[in-house]
Image: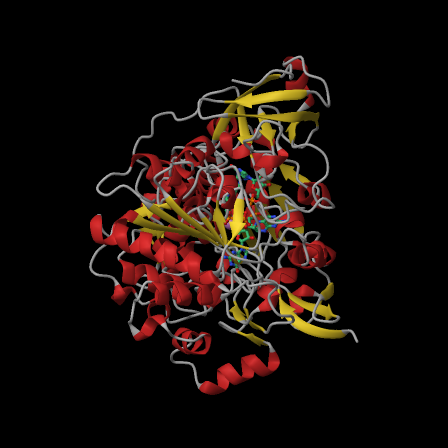
């Protein structure tokens, strides 16, 4: 008999949906959106429509596996949990005793965004081992740094107020792919009379839908935003009362902005003077004004500066004054958890070395004192998703590296492992889910049992701690105890309510205007408009005639879902503007070699007005095995860090493109 079961989607995505699963004989047979978390509105995105196929995939890793072939070849044999764990524990102990805990490196991100799955027992175990600490900056490093410096927290307006906005700037975000449940809210705003402007080097589906597209040159948004700010100030159309009452550092901002008259900005950004003037006029006259950047716009060497200028533009226009307006990048700060109680940094033996995840390849191939000798990967697939892939793969292939992967699939990363442990998927376990966009706490109960011998992340790390003979009571805590620690300070009724209802609204009241009706959490209670520290001069790490942008694909979430034949169809594609195609003598559908000094990959070129001239696009990311010659688009992306926050610079890549003859190997 089929039964329905409420659950939560655990992907690293703005929407954090509530879903309804249909379960028949301990098997999930259908997934649909629900209204428990109201923004989900009974529908799910393209990828989650394929989640049944993913959860029941015949390729799921069901048992612990030990490598028998060469590294990277992907040949494994089944072993028992006891054998795999005791062999891994013995190697880890030996590394710790001889070279020190810092020779061990965890690598994880948000494969499962549940509170316990993302960061709980894993952190405790690595702290207790004295392992190197991973700086998890690959996605939002620059933005997090700037939001904290300017506002003291990551808070935006409640997305449920979007329909009240009358001017919305979608700035470096493509909700049609990455935030589909924002689309009905935007549509509603349009019906209410709003104008939506899309600032993106690509004519994205959102640009097509909402009409007004500003096709900016990648990485020049700080110039655009400063020039608009400068023009508003010069025309005396800035919001002086807001600036005086709520901000600090206006003079410093003004000095920076003055360097960018519209004419000069037009040259740098590739946006015409006429369009710039229209933008100034709109910003000066239409309220409520919502500036809605995505994380896409900060994946550049000046990513921090870019986010700073966008937030400062919201401040000098006084966008925060109106309900429905403001600056919506992250709502992570609407939820508060006792992170330290949950992850227990006090278990660390002292200060430990930090390693930035963006530079995994460098860490594995260059670090000394001590070199990394063991890598433990979960919730992430860096062989496919980390930049400077050639170096990452070189590191993963090191014969002397002990590599352990906990995942549900034999990913590109897992193929390099010495031991692969089977991971349960989120609908097979319990967890608490928060969003970085909306403000609902959600509780997920298991709908089915994990297949084979798969276990959740906290359980995997509890088992590892036991095998390592680590005896601190913090390392045997149950999921319930972990959750209690995370929710320290909340009354027990909160937890029962969450479990009973599944969904509880958090954060300030929706009508509270962030930073006007809520406190500004900087030291002086003001929004800091001073510019972030200037980036240390970077060598020009880029060369090649084209800017390569590799944003989120609609069909996958990074590499996840990339192994479903019904989702991934056809070869990997490089989208090019027709002008560039003909200048390069290329024809639609031809194979091309895309390369720079970091690496190369082979794709099929397709002619399209998606990118502006000078920009080429390949959506992130395909499995390596999907590419005729191995590497995917991350062969070409830089591992350089953003100006502040140690963020990634994926979209700050330059490449050359040439017709590929095929046949022989590319060298
Ligand atoms: N379907 C799907 N959904 C996802 C994901 C996915 O992979 N697939 N990923 C999830 C994750 S991990 C994240 S972080 C979010 C990210 O979702 P978003 O915040 O939407 O960010 P991105 O997809 O990185 O990039 C968005 C847009 O930024 C544009 N862009 C790139 N460079 C620039 C620039 O210099 N200036 C401007 N103005 N625009 C620029 C790109 O062309 C792209 O259209 O989405 C989440 N949701
Ligand atoms: N070129 C390019 N590269 C990019 C980006 C880009 O825009 N362009 N975006 C970057 C961004 S924003 C991000 S966030 C990163 C994301 O990069 P990754 O963190 O590597 O994300 P995924 O590829 O989704 O891999 C997540 C893995 O976690 C596994 N997983 C899921 N749930 C669980 C669980 O409960 N337990 C365990 N143990 N494993 C689980 C999944 O099976 C999957 O293999 O990629 C970055 N890479
Ligand atoms: Mo991300």
Count of numbered badges drawn on the protein = 0
Please identify the residue farthest to the right as the structure is shown: 1
**In front here: 327 or 236?**
327
Q: Residue at x 38, y 60 (%)?
A: 246
* Residue 13 point in image, percent of width and height: 57, 55
Asked where in the image residue 664 lies, by quadrant, the reply is: top right
Q: Residue at x 74, y 57 (%)?
A: 191
**In front here: 71 or 307?**
71
Question: In which quadrant will I find the N terminus?
Answer: bottom right
Q: Is residue 605 visible?
A: yes
Structure colour scheme: secondary structure
**In front here: 276 or 422?**
422
Q: Is residue 237 visible?
A: no
* Residue 522 point in image, percent of width and height: 32, 61
* Residue 431 point in image, percent of width and height: 53, 70
Q: Residue at x 42, y 81 (%)?
A: 490
Q: Is residue 444 left or right of residue 48?
A: left
Q: Residue at x 59, y 56 (%)?
A: 287
Name above or below for residue 221 compared with residue 136: above
**In front here: 5 or 58?**
58
Q: Is residue 651 left or right of residue 17?
A: left
């Amino acid at each position: 008999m089929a039964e329905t079961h409420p659950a939560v989607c655990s992907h690293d995505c703005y929407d954090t949906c509530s879903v309804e699963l249909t379960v028949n004989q301990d098997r999930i047979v259908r997934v649909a959106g629900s209204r428990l978390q109201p923004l989900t509105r009974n529908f799910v995105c393209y990828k989650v429509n394929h989640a049944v196929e993913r959860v029941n995939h015949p390729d799921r890793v069901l048992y612990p596996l030990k490598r028998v072939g060469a590294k990277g070849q992907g040949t494994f044999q089944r072993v028992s949990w006891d054998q795999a764990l005791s062999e891994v524990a013995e190697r880890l102990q030996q590394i710790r005793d001889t070279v020190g805990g810092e020779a061990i490196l965890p690598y994880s991100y948000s494969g499962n965004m549940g509170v316990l799955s993302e960061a709980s027992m894993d952190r405790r175990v690595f702290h207790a081992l004295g392992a190197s600490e991973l700086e998890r900056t690959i996605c939002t490093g620059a933005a997090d740094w700037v939001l904290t410096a300017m506002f003291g927290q990551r808070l935006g307006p409640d997305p449920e107020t979007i329909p009240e906005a009358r001017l919305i700037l979608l700035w470096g975000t493509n909700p049609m792919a990455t935030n589909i449940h924002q689309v009905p809210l935007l549509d509603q705003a349009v019906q209410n009379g709003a104008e939506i402007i899309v600032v993106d080097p690509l004519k994205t589906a959102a640009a097509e839908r909402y009409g007004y597209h500003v096709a900016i040159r990648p990485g020049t948004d700080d110039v655009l935003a400063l020039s608009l700010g400068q023009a508003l100030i010069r025309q005396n159309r800035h919001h002086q009362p807001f600036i005086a009452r709520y901000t600090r550092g206006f003079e410093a901002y003004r000095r920076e902005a003055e360097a960018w008259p519209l004419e000069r900005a037009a040259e740098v950004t590739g946006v015409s003077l006429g369009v710039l003037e229209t933008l100034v006029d709109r910003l000066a006259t239409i309220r409520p004004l919502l500036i809605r950047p995505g994380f896409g716009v900060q994946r550049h060497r000046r990513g921090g500066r870019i986010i700073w200028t966008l937030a400062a533009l919201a401040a000098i226009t006084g966008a925060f004054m109106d309900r429905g307006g403001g600056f919506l990048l992250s709502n992570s700060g609407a939820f508060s958890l006792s992170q330290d109680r949950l992850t227990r940094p006090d278990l660390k033996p002292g200060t430990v070395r930090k390693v930035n995840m963006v530079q995994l390849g460098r860490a594995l191939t260059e670090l000394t004192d001590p070199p990394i000798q063991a890598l433990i990967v979960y919730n992430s697939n860096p062989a496919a998703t980390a930049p400077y892939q050639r170096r990452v793969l070189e590191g993963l292939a090191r014969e002397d590296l002990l590599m352990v992967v906990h995942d549900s699939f034999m990913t590109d990363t897992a193929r390099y492992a010495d031991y692969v442990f089977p991971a349960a998927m989120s609908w097979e376990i319990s967890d608490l889910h928060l969003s970085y966009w909306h403000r609902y706490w959600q509780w997920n109960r298991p709908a089915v049992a994990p297949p084979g011998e798969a276990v959740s992340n906290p359980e995997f790390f509890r088992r590892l701690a036991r095998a390592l003979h680590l005896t601190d009571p913090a390392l045997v805590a149950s999921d319930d105890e972990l959750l209690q620690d995370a929710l320290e300070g909340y009354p027990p009724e909160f937890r029962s309510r969450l479990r009973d209802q599944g969904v509880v609204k958090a954060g300030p009241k929706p009508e509270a205007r962030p930073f006007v009706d809520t406190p500004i959490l900087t030291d002086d209670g003001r929004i800091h408009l001073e510019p972030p520290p200037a980036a240390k001069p970077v060598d020009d790490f880029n060369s090649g005639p084209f800017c390569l942008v590799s944003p989120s694909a609609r069909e996958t979430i990074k590499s996840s879902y990339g192994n479903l034949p019904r989702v991934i169809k056809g070869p990997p594609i490089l989208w090019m503007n027709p002008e560039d195609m003909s200048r390069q003598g290329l024809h639609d559908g031809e194979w091309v070699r895309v390369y720079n000094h970091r690496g190369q990959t082979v794709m099929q070129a397709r002619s399209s007005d998606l990118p502006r001239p000078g920009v080429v696009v390949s959506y992130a990311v395909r499995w390596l095995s999907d590419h005729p010659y191995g590497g995917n688009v991350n062969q070409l992306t830089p591992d350089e860090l953003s100006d502040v926050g140690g963020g990634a610079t994926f979209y700050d890549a330059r490449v050359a493109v040439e017709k590929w003859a095929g046949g022989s190997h590319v060298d």
